[in-house]
Image (tube, rainbow, N blue to C red):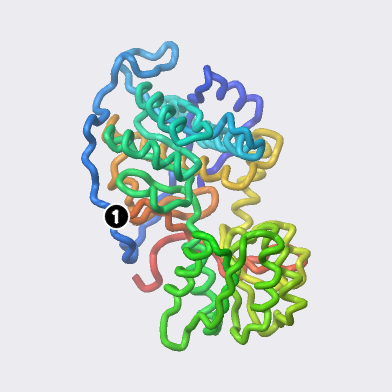
């Protein structure tokens, strides 16, 4: 795992340079592995029309650095001025996480250059143009799928890769990599584990949304043979009231496992309806995704003993502790993604300028070790992550099947 442990005062001083951060970070740890399993075919590559190939006097530089020296310029696009307080806080925390990663290594040759994602795709496109004009060799962010789509043609034209935080796989590929956790990965992991524990008949309670359909398709795709089946599906309007009646109906299922991908208040609204509807936890195993990783779920009796897939809680605890040591507060969820993105940038930054961030480097089948476990990129640009299976109990979350520490398959 990328480590981090620094004093807050030191970090604050190093990070405040005219809206930039010029600090350095620790490298990724790669692990020798076998070639990855078959994955979706990537879209054909689009050749860069005006590739960035050389340092220019107009590119941004730090004071007292010779003009002929080529630093590693890293553009960061996040919604720093969002009108939604939680989003604005997340953007700030992601930048801080990126800065922590940089500060780790002592490599003073990396420059973070920030630009605002804004509130519309056109704002993100303008931010990308600004950073490219400043010489960004790689871009970290944006946060939202429409923003990623808005910058895609420009960055591809320049041959500049992007490490974005969206989970919308339709915007990935051809030099754009998604750091986010894909719901299909969570689904496949928890369903595959349930199959190994003797569950063969599945029911599903999913929202009537694209997210619901994606996770339902992943559930069906994970079933391996004729004895495995999806017996019942209930869809619901994704509201607190809309989930209650469908939850009550599916509580009467004859399946031996019930998959509910959505978390948050929706899950907690469904929980009592499952109980009053007659669901027997000893008979039907509840299955979920990383959205279930909320302490409020520990008090829900219907969820006791349920399984979900997600990063190992000890990794999250360790990252939160180090962030808290540096900044005095806990980070919001997703902040660690920025840490991993910039750590990955630094691991590849020792190569020749304008030739170091190659598609071959990002496609390394060995993968990388991040703050929340191992990950690697599939040819379609999405991240495959090593996830644990976690059980919910009144006294906390318990790992019942550890996250893998390597992508090597047993016996390979």
For label 1, the residue is 42
The picture places residue 159, in percent across and down from the top left corner, at: 28, 36
Q: Give neighbour class at mark 1: few <14, some 14-19, many 20+ (Cα, 10 Å).
A: some
The picture places residue 318, in percent across and down from the top left corner, at: 63, 48
The picture places residue 235, in percent across and down from the top left corner, at: 58, 69
The picture places residue 173, in percent across and down from the top left corner, at: 33, 49
- Residue shown at 37% from the left, 27% from the top: 129
Which of the two residues, 258 or 326, is positioned nearer the viewer here? 258
Which of the two residues, 209 or 45, is positioned nearer the viewer here? 209
Quadrant assignment, res 137: top left
Image vertical order of residue 54 relative to residue 362, above or below: above
- Residue shown at 51% from the left, 54% from the top: 373
Asked whether residue 311 appears in the rendered view, the answer is yes
- Residue shown at 64% from the left, 60% from the top: 263
- Residue shown at 34% from the left, 47% from the top: 362
Number of callouts in the render?
Answer: 1
Judged from this view, the residue extending furthest toward the top is 64
Asked whether residue 5 appears in the rendered view, the answer is no
Residue 183 in the figure: left or right of residue 72: right
- For label 1, the SS is loop
Residue 212 in the figure: left or right of residue 329: left
């Amino acid at each position: 795992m990328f480590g981090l442990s620094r004093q807050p005062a030191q970090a604050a001083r190093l990070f405040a340079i005219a809206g930039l951060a010029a600090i350095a970070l620790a490298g990724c740890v790669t692990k020798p592995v076998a070639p990855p399993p078959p994955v979706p075919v990537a879209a054909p590559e689009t050749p860069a029309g005006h590739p960035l190939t050389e340092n220019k006097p107009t590119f941004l530089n730090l004071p007292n650095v010779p003009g002929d020296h080529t630093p590693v310029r890293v553009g960061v696009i996040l919604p720093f001025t969002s009108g939604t307080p939680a989003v604005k806080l997340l953007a700030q925390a992601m930048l801080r996480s990126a800065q922590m990663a940089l500060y780790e290594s002592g490599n003073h040759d990396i420059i973070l250059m920030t630009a605002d994602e804004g509130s519309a795709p056109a704002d993100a496109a303008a931010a990308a143009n600004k950073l490219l004009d400043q010489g960004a060799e790689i871009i970290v962010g944006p946060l939202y799928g429409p923003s990623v789509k808005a910058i895609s043609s420009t960055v591809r034209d320049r041959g500049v890769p992007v490490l974005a935080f969206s989970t919308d796989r339709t915007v990935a590929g051809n030099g754009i990599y998604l750091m986010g956790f894909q719901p299909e990965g969570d689904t496949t992991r928890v369903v595959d584990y349930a199959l190994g524990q003797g569950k063969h008949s599945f029911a599903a309670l999913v929202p009537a949304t694209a997210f619901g359909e994606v996770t339902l398709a992943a559930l069906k795709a994970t079933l391996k043979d004729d004895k495995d089946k999806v017996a019942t599906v209930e869809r619901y309007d994704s509201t607190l009231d809309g989930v209650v009646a469908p939850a009550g109906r599916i509580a009467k299922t004859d399946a031996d496992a019930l998959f509910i991908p959505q978390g948050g208040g929706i899950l907690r609204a469904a929980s009592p309806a499952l109980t009053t509807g007659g669901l027997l936890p000893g008979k039907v195993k509840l299955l979920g995704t990383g959205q279930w990783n909320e302490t409020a779920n520990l008090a829900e009796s219907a969820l006791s003993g349920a399984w979900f897939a997600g990063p190992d809680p000890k990794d999250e605890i360790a990252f939160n502790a180090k962030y808290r040591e540096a900044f005095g507060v806990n980070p919001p969820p997703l902040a660690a993604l920025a840490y991993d993105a910039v750590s990955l940038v630094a691991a590849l930054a020792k190569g020749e300028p304008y030739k170091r961030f190659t598609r071959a480097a990002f496609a390394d089948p060995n993968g990388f070790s991040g703050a929340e476990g191992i990950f690697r990129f599939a040819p379609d640009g999405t991240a495959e992550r090593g996830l644990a299976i976690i059980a919910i109990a009144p006294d906390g979350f318990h790992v019942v099947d550890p996250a893998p520490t390597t992508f090597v398959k047993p016996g390979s």
